Image (spheres, rainbow, N blue to C red):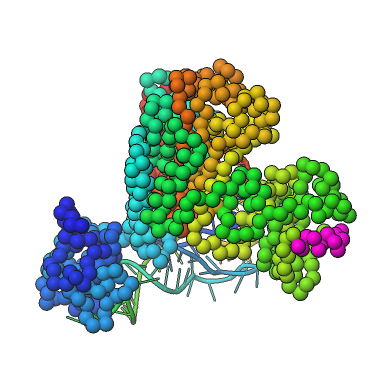
Amino acid sequence: MTDTFSMHTHTCGELRADNIGETVTLTGWVWHRRDHGGLIFIDLRDRDGVTQISFDPEHSGGTAFHAAETIRSEWPIKVTGVVRERPEGQSNAKLATGEIEVLVSHIEVLNTSKTPPFQIEDHIEAGEDIRLRYRYLDIRRPKMMANLQMRSDFTFAIRQALHDRLFMEVETPALFKSTPEGARDFLVPSRIQPGHFYALPQSPQLLKQLLMVGGVERYYQVAKCFRDEDLRADRQPEFTQVDVEMSFVDQDDVMGCIETVLGEALGKMGVDVQLPLRRIQYWDAMDTYGSDKPDTRYGMELHDVTPIFSNSKFKLFASAAADEKTFVKAINAKGAGKWPRAKIDKLADVASEFGAKGLAYIAFREDGSVTSPIVKFFSDEEMSALRTEMDVEPGDLVMFAVESRLHADEILGGMRRHMADALELPREGHDLLWVVNFPLFHWDEETKRYEAEHQPFTLPTETDPDKIMADPLAVGSYTYDFVMDGFEAGGGGMRIHNAEMQMAILKMLGFTEEGAREQFGFLLDALAFGAPPMGGFALGLDRVCMLLAGGDSIRDVMAFPKTSSGSDLMSDAPSEVSTKQLKEVSLRLL
RNA sequence: GGGGUGUUAGCUCAGCUGGUUAGAGCGCCGGCCUGUCACGUCGGAGGUCGAGGGUUCAAGUCCCUUACAUCCCGCCA
């Protein structure tokens, strides 16, 4: 594509053998400079690629050649010259432009540069803190540039796919009402109304439901979301969701539409997507993988071995078998049975991180022997049944959890992930699936009340509020999480579109009628004015881009991310503000 | 809120049981070099060892406090 809105005629990634003989103008940054005394090569880099430009005293004249002797790394320059074929045997296969070079006749130094604090190279990895302090230099690295370009391409592909299906992009406010039910809100004090606060939205959830009541029917937004919680490699206080909502639909309509859009957009990024995506029931995911966001590219599945030990001499297992609420579950980490005992014993510490009190295990050594603190209690029949159930081979490590169903699943799910990393199990390609039908509620021991598993606006599969009250934990919901490579990459559900049902659910969650009205009155009002059946979805754009980039931190696909203490090392935000500013918003510091 | 790891030259790191003048690679500066491409080669500059306190004849090294970074748990409807 010819670009006339620029100082250059071509980008640095563009020229090929076909261009030989043309006079071209390039702009970019001086990357590597190779000064041979009478001949100087420079790798000129822009966002698109690298072109070798060469200077010799004969063709470049005194001025250009002299300039080439004095310019330094990262100076932006503009050069004009003739594209020529490289001499026999001098082409560079590592470079897309490696067959040619530009023999410079004229150079314009557009600016100088200080020596960068770290080298702008993909193969030299600087510490992340200095990269963040000078993020604008870090972005010049080809890998970072490629990440941002990929993110832009993917976002555009999703926009296109949604636009093609008649979705309307609507912007919702960033200054909204605090609804402190989920994550902690970021608060913004109001100057005009002293003592009152806006909150930055944790997601546009309520607003998109109101758009459905407004008749928008198909909405989307590439929306910034804000949550004031601790950071992780895959969690930032502000992040981006592709937020989608549809009305006059059922769950299959929404899931079908979303997976079509995702398949189209991911397909453009080179991901092989087979539709329809696999659907796993929530409880099946928990029972089999110990996770509601399983990575199914490797096995190590959880097995319920409770029945094997119903008459065991090992009291812990036998009493679990006698108690219908307690289970003996196991996983087989193939290969870890070769580990030395000390290393295996340390796994108990890992298990305790996931809530286990201890870790029972059996290591099956390659010489046929067995290392285990518990195996002496087992009968031959029990061992044989266990070997069959767990598909035991020499070199295997079988680990047990004896807990309530959910607790055992969570512990072994955590161990499964840990062992997959420790054993460096191969995980090829991308793993895409739906986890569906989450329970509507779970019981929170700390607050001693029911909490919404997904969100308080999720449509229950049970339509009778009285039946929901009777056995809340048994109620399912119209929910679906999009899981990619073991990450929760998106999630959605059908929404309650009936005001009475919404109020009933809020009461179940511990709200009084007045409290519910105070916080969600505008939603309850809206639902009462002919709200249509609706459902939607939100895609964690940062996480998906991270996985597409093959990275393990969303910071690598964000232009200006924050550190784990929420700082921006470049601008030094958050920073103190003046007393005057505080006074304007009627605040005084403690 | 809790646990792990780290902080030494501009960058990435090494530095043993405490013991002379704290090293390497890259980068930077200068010389040489007309086919390199992470050019080569010769020479040079560059360090309050994150900060504060302590133990000791002696601390980069041991102890305490603290800051920052990072990973994980809690948290993230």
Residue A144: x and y in percent read 37, 57
Range of magenta residues = A376-388
Residue A511 seen anywhere in this rendered image of the structure:
no
Residue A484: x and y in percent read 51, 51
| Residue A365 horizontal side relative to residue A123, left or right | right
| Residue A156 horizontal side relative to residue A494, left or right | left
Along the line of sight, the residue nearer the viewer: A72 or A273: A273
> What residue do we see at 71% from left, 54% from top?
A303
Along the line of sight, the residue nearer the viewer: A453 or A98: A453
> What residue do we see at 15% from left, 54% from top?
A4
For residue A392, above or below residue A432: below
* Majority secondary structure in the magenta region: helix
Along the line of sight, the residue nearer the viewer: A556 or A428: A428
> What residue do we see at 59% from left, 63% from top?
A425
Along the line of sight, the residue nearer the viewer: A279 or A421: A279
Residue A373 picture quarter: bottom right
Quadrant into which the N terminus of chain A falls: bottom left
| Residue A317 horizontal side relative to residue A576, left or right | right
> What residue do we see at 47% from left, 31% from top?
A534
Q: Give the number of callouts.
A: 0
